[in-house]
Amino acid sequence: MIPEHRTPLAPIPPNAARDDRPFAAVLWMVAAQACFACMSLGGRLLAGRVAWPQVALVRFVIGALAAYLVARIRLQRLVIRHRSAQFWRSVFGTLAAMGTFYLLSRAEMALGDAVTLFATSPLFVALISLPLLGERVTKSTLAAALFGFLGVILIARPSMSSAPWLVAIGIGTAASTAIAMVWLRRMGPDESSEAIVFYFSLFGAVPLLGLAYRQWKDPTAAEWLLLVTTAFAGGFGQIFMTRAYSLTSAARVSAVMSTGVVMTRFAAMGILGERADGLQWLGTAIIVIATTLVAARSRTLQRHPPPKS
């Protein structure tokens, strides 16, 4: 049972009325993407060695442990105020995680196609922010999301030659991610980030137990070390991301998600020896510029917030 205070889930007022700390939110999201880049690189190194349900299961279990440890250090209680929102955040977050790990494990799914499909998530967030959150998406935020997506295309080089059913799973994964982030935003700043991640991770581990049991391969000591390190990176990334969505509009936070692709690219260059060509460097520059503009605008809003209507 999830401990709960029965506080009603209030609607979010329009016109960014809850944008209290937008610049801090952007910084938290960039930190989260750095953690997710480490997780993605670990996943690539484990591909073919360990079944994808094992990677996902360890990710969720260690994620719960990371959240618990951080909560103990910060003297935070693992209490959820909005239980229904936590449930739906966990449902769609689990679907998104399973879709991500599954597609990355499929040899017939081109990596560039998968990365590009996942990168449509901020666009889904922008589309559903107004009807589901009452948050208007500014032109600058929408432009940043679109330019970030363009940068991802230049870096990932999608061939779109993957099977249609795999593409459909990719789109569904991106949509599930967006819906999970909207529910995360609805929970608001009065929730503990550690509690949200803790119960989400426990929820996601349940369906993966059966899948992992059927496909279990005994990892070597080196693979266990990589699994645990990767999972801790993902767990801390979840905590940082949860904090980010509690501080500003969902669309603004999502607009800087593409920085994770850049960080993954640099990590792959340094560790895997991959090389980038001119178009990929151009895509990197576009994402960095778009993120910088979002951060600059967010810093201005934090220093000089608009009058509340």
Image (cartoon, grey):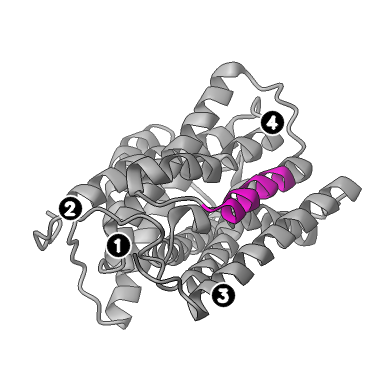
Write down the region rendered in magenta: 138-152
Q: Nearer the viewer, mark 1 or mark 3?
A: 3
Q: Mark 1–mark 3 contact, CB under 8 Å?
A: no
Q: Which residue is mark 3?
A: 300
Q: Which residue is mark 2?
A: 83
Q: Nearer the viewer, mark 1 or mark 2?
A: 1
The residue drawn where x is 17% and y is 53% is 83
The residue drawn where x is 30% and y is 38% is 207
Disc 3 secondary structure class:
helix
In three-dimensional space, the C-alpha distance between marks 2 and 3, rounded to whole angstroms, equals 34 Å
Mark earlier in primary sequence (1, 4): 4
Q: Mark 2: few, some, or many residues within 10 Å (few <14, many ≥20)?
A: many
Mark earlier in primary sequence (1, 3): 1
Amino acid, disc 2: Arg
Q: Horizontally, is 237 left or right of 152 in the view?
A: left
Amino acid, disc 1: Gly
In three-dimensional space, the C-alpha distance between marks 1 and 2, rounded to whole angstroms, equals 12 Å
Residue 95, x across and y down, in percent: 39, 37
Q: Is residue 2 visible?
A: yes
Front residue (pair 209, 79): 79
